[in-house]
Image (cartoon, rainbow, N blue to C red):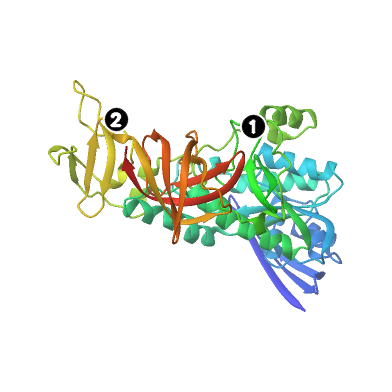
């Protein structure tokens, strides 16, 4: 017999409950708080997975899901699919697709850390209200929903490296670290735990077979393609993934969601790193220990042209915030030196580079040419690829501006992602 405890607060209200569980079967449930007594009568005699599909009062459900999230298991089932739910329209449509295809769906939402001092914590895709929206959608369709509270693990794996990345002079991309590493590792582990044969998400990406292996590929909707963010996924991980929206268009999915009565159809999209909660990343960094460190702005010859309050406030290609005034030729950030605190600036043409070195690189192909995408919003450019120990080098056919160390370089052949690595250095054209 195992005891599971969960509690929750909602405004000034509090609830707690204790489950007695015998090999996944709920023998008894006791506790206090709004809705706990009614829920206890409903879930007694159920498995944990069955209880996860039981509706009830919000506060009682929060406590129940806090108790069962990390403990639910189920035997393997070929028809079972874990569906990652964020509370937004894309994951809602992923669930709709799974059910329409006859899958035994189980929804799962990751509760991640959000800056409690952010101006708008509800903008985050992992906010408490988003978790509740995902759960409500699942319950309305009779689908079990599990919440995994990974706030501290997420903070250590994604937020802390984001802070240290800026202090070390690089421009990190936390969404890449979250999606391709932390998030999918946790979701895959959960899917295996509940006996699901695959994991579905609402990402706009596809899976193709190339040279006998499954690889990630661009989504059909070029404006929403998320293959860049997911490029770190391995062929082994991809084998168990399903992207039901990969061949669809975002605008059509919103329309379809309205037609089938999904309230998420009207939910706005999150546009920045979720944990920032609507804050400017510079304000966030200051709140979390990155203090002001005055330094100098220098031109390409090393001549001082101004002062700044912290090198970490600048990234290659940045023009605003230099405080150099107008009247002369526009200047852009070329690079930063965390050792001296110096920020080097220069004209736009000095941003162009033709050679890029990448560390922690993985290539899934023997091809020595491909299209290199060096930022999420930048177009890909043709490049020659040279392997080296621990990474690869790129020789770009055309100069690219504002290549930033710390960002991800993703290599495509046609639409397939054949490699990725973290940009370590760039060299001017």
The foreground one among 122 and 106 is: 106
Q: Quadrant of the C terminus?
A: top left
Is the residue marked by circle 2 packed among few (<14), some (14-19), or many (20+) residues within 10 Å? few
Which callout, 1 or 2, points at the residue further toward the start of the chain?
1
**Is 60 situated left or right of 352 in this image?**
right
- Per the image, label 1 sits on a secondary structure element best described as loop
Residue 16 appears in the rendering: no
At x 45%, y 61%, the residue is 390
The foreground one among 13 and 17 is: 17
Residue 211 picture location, percent across and down: 67, 51
Res 349 label: 2
Is the residue marked by circle 1 packed among few (<14), some (14-19), or many (20+) residues within 10 Å? some
At x 54%, y 50%, the residue is 419
Residue 244 picture location, percent across and down: 74, 42
Q: How far apart are marks 1 and 2 (CA)?
A: 32 Å
Q: Quadrant of residue 53?
A: bottom right
- Per the image, label 2 sits on a secondary structure element best described as helix
- Provide the residue designation for mark 1: 221
Q: In which quarter of the image is the N terminus?
A: bottom right
């Amino acid at each position: 017999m195992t005891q599971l405890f969960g509690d929750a607060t909602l405004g000034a209200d509090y609830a707690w409950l204790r489950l007695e569980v015998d090999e996944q079967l709920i023998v008894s449930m006791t506790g206090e708080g709004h809705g706990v007594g009614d829920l206890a009568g409903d879930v007694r005699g159920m498995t944990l997975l069955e209880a996860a599909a039981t509706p009830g009062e919000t506060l009682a459900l929060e406590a129940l899901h806090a108790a069962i999230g990390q403990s639910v298991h189920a035997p393997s089932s070929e028809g079972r699919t874990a569906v990652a739910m964020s509370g937004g329209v894309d994951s809602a449509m992923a669930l709709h697709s799974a059910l329409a295809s006859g899958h035994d769906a189980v929804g799962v939402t990751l509760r991640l850390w959000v800056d409690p001092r952010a101006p708008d914590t509800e903008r985050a895709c992992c906010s408490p209200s988003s978790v509740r929206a995902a759960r409500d959608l699942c319950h309305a369709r009779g689908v079990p929903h599990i919440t995994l509270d990974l706030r501290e693990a997420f903070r250590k794996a994604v937020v802390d490296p984001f802070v240290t990345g800026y202090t070390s002079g690089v421009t990190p991309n936390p969404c890449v670290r979250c999606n391709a590493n932390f998030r999918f590792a946790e979701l895959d582990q959960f899917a295996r735990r509940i006996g699901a044969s695959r994991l579905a998400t609402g990402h706009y990406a596809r899976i193709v077979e190339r040279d006998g292996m499954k690889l990630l590929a661009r989504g059909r909707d070029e404006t929403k393609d998320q293959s860049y963010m997911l490029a770190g996924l391995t062929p082994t991980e991809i084998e168990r993934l399903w992207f039901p929206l990969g061949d669809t268009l975002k605008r059509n999915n919103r329309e379809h969601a309205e037609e089938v009565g999904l309230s998420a159809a009207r939910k706005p999209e999150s546009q920045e790193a979720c944990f920032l909660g609507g804050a400017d990343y510079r304000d966030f960094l200051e709140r979390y220990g990155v203090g002001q460190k005055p330094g100098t702005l220098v031109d390409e010859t090393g001549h001082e042209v101004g002062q700044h309050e912290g090198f970490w406030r600048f990234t290659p290609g940045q023009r605003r915030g230099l405080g150099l005034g107008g009247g002369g030729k526009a200047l852009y950030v070329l690079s930063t030196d965390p050792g001296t605190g110096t920020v080097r600036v220069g004209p736009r043409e000095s941003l162009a580079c033709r050679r890029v070195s990448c560390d922690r690189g993985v290539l899934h192909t023997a091809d020595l040419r491909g299209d290199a995408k060096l930022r999420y919003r930048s177009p890909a450019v043709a490049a020659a690829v040279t392997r080296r120990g621990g990474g690869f080098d790129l020789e770009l056919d055309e100069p690219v501006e504002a290549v930033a160390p710390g960002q991800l370089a993703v290599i495509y052949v046609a639409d397939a992602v054949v490699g990725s690595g973290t940009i370590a250095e760039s060299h001017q054209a």
